[in-house]
Image (cartoon, rainbow, N blue to C red):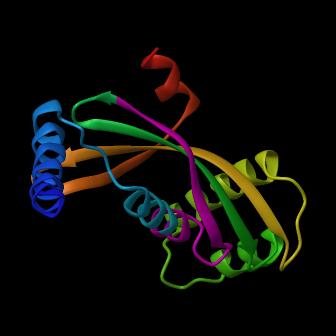
């Protein structure tokens, strides 16, 4: 009798969990999805300057059924100094003068917000990212600014 109950209860328990998850709308991006998305986004955003060593979700919350905010801790290694990175951008023949000017402004902002670092140094970044639920699953929409966060309160 116990063997019959175990074989019956286990599949029924699994079906109940799946059913309740669907009914209650317990849906959010997986931790692996969040960490991979943030790693890709960060590596693209700082290509040639930093490379992500680890991206860990410290916290997360749903703003609503289709918006999820992940509070992340990113550890990145410096591939170049800011001076080397700046020189590389200025010498890049594929960039037009306006793009070079925009990169120059971004570099100035980076110099103001980042601590001094050298090639090989590891830096910690605390960032918030917005994920949205689409027809094809969860998608990293953007990195949230302080202004974005204050508007949701």
Nearer-the-camera pick, 114 or 86: 114
In reply to whether residue 104 is colored magenta, the answer given is no
Against 38, residue 26 (above or below) is: above
Outermost top residue: 153
Residue that appears at 60% across and 67% down: 46
Rendered location of residue 24, percent (x, y): 17, 31
Q: Is residue 96 left or right of residue 11?
A: right
Decide which of 30, 52 is in the foreground and name it.
30
The part of the image, by quadrant, that contains residue 68 is top left
Q: Percent position (x, y) of residue 36?
A: 44, 67
As displayed, is residue 141 above or below residue 56?
Answer: above
In reply to whether residue 61 is colored magenta, the answer given is yes
The residue that appears at 19% across and 45% down in the rendered structure is 17
Q: Is residue 117 left or right of residue 25?
A: right
User: From which residue to which does the magenta span run?
Assistant: 40-62
In the rendered view of the protein, which quadrant contains the N terminus? bottom left
Instruction: Pinpoint residue 32: horizontal percent, then vertical percent.
Output: 42, 63
Q: Nearer the viewer, residue 64 or 10?
A: 10
Q: In this orientation, does residue 136 appear?
A: no
The residue sitting at 18% across, 35% down in the picture is 25
Q: Is residue 96 above or below residue 38?
A: below
Residue at 37% across, 62% down: 33
Q: Quadrant of residue 43?
A: bottom right
């Amino acid at each position: 009798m116990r063997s019959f109950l175990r074989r019956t209860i286990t599949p029924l328990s699994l079906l109940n969990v799946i059913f309740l998850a669907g009914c209650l709308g317990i849906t959010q991006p997986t931790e692996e999805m969040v960490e991979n998305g943030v790693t890709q986004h960060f590596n693209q955003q700082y290509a040639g300057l930093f490379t992500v060593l680890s991206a860990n979700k410290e916290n997360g919350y749903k703003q609503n059924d289709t918006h999820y905010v992940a509070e992340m801790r990113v550890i990145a290694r410096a591939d170049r100094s800011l001076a080397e990175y700046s020189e590389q951008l200025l010498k890049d023949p594929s960039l037009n003068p306006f793009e070079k000017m925009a990169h120059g402004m971004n570099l100035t902002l980076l110099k103001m917000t980042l601590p001094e670092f050298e090639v090989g140094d590891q830096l910690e970044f605390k960032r918030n990212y917005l994920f949205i639920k689409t027809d094809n699953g969860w998608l990293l929409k953007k990195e949230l600014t302080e202004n974005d966060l204050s508007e949701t309160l």
